[in-house]
Amino acid sequence: MSHETGDCLFCRIRDGEVPSTKVYEDEQVIAFKDINPKAPLHVLIVPRKHIATINDITEADAGLAGHLFLVAKQVAADAGYGDIGYQVQMNCLKGGGQVIFHIHLHLLAGGRSGPLLPAG
Ligand code: AMP
Ligand code: ZN
């Protein structure tokens, strides 16, 4: 798995080279349905900027990082989960369950609530 932009799946989705089911986009982020949903609503909120992991977020990205949460709130509300509730999660590195090395916020709703990663 490369940490470079060149062969990054989410950069390719951003650029329209790989199809996705988009539910939201603006100048900073795109959001699309997870291909292997773990809940009735499972959307990935992805900055257009390639940032490989949480460890690579800098102070200059603080506004962008915050914006991911505002988009999660909006997408959840649009899908009818604003008052019911939802989960957001971002994984960091293999030990934290990260598979795609372009940061993304998981938005999940409508399923059994609980941790996305098994304990231990
Ligand atoms: P993570 O383990 O946090 O890196 O999450 C990666 C997520 O990307 C997983 O939930 C996958 O199901 C999802 N995923 C992988 N390929 C695609 C794709 N082509 N379109 C949408 N979601 C994908
Ligand atoms: Zn990327």
Image (cartoon, helix red, strand yellow):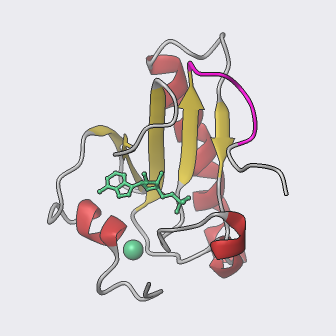
Taking the image as drawn, is residue 93 in sight? no
Q: Residue at x 21, y 66 (%)?
A: 15
For residue 13, side relative to residue 103 (left or right): left
Determine whether 17 is above or below 119 in the image: below
| Of residues 105 and 117, the one drawn nearer to the viewer in this rendering | 117
Most extreme residue toward the right is: 120
What span is colored magenta in the figure? 110-115
Q: Does the magenta stretch include residue 52?
A: no
For residue 39, side relative to residue 96 (left or right): left
**Residue 51 x/y as whole percent:** 52, 75
| Of residues 102 and 40, the one drawn nearer to the viewer in this rendering | 40
Most extreme residue toward the front is: 120
Determine whether 108 is above or below 55 in the image: above
| Magenta: main secondary structure | loop
Q: Residue at x 66, y 22 (%)?
A: 112
Q: Quadrant of residue 7?
A: bottom left
Quadrant field for ligand 1: bottom left
**Residue 63 x/y as whole percent:** 63, 59
Q: Which residue is drawn at 51% across and 29% down?
A: 39
For residue 54, side relative to residue 21 (left or right): right
**Where, quadrant-wise, is the C terminus in this rendering?**
bottom right
**Residue 69 x/y as whole percent:** 63, 43
**Residue 41 x/y as whole percent:** 47, 27
Taking the image as drawn, is residue 119 in sight? yes
Determine whether 11 is above or below 43 in the image: below
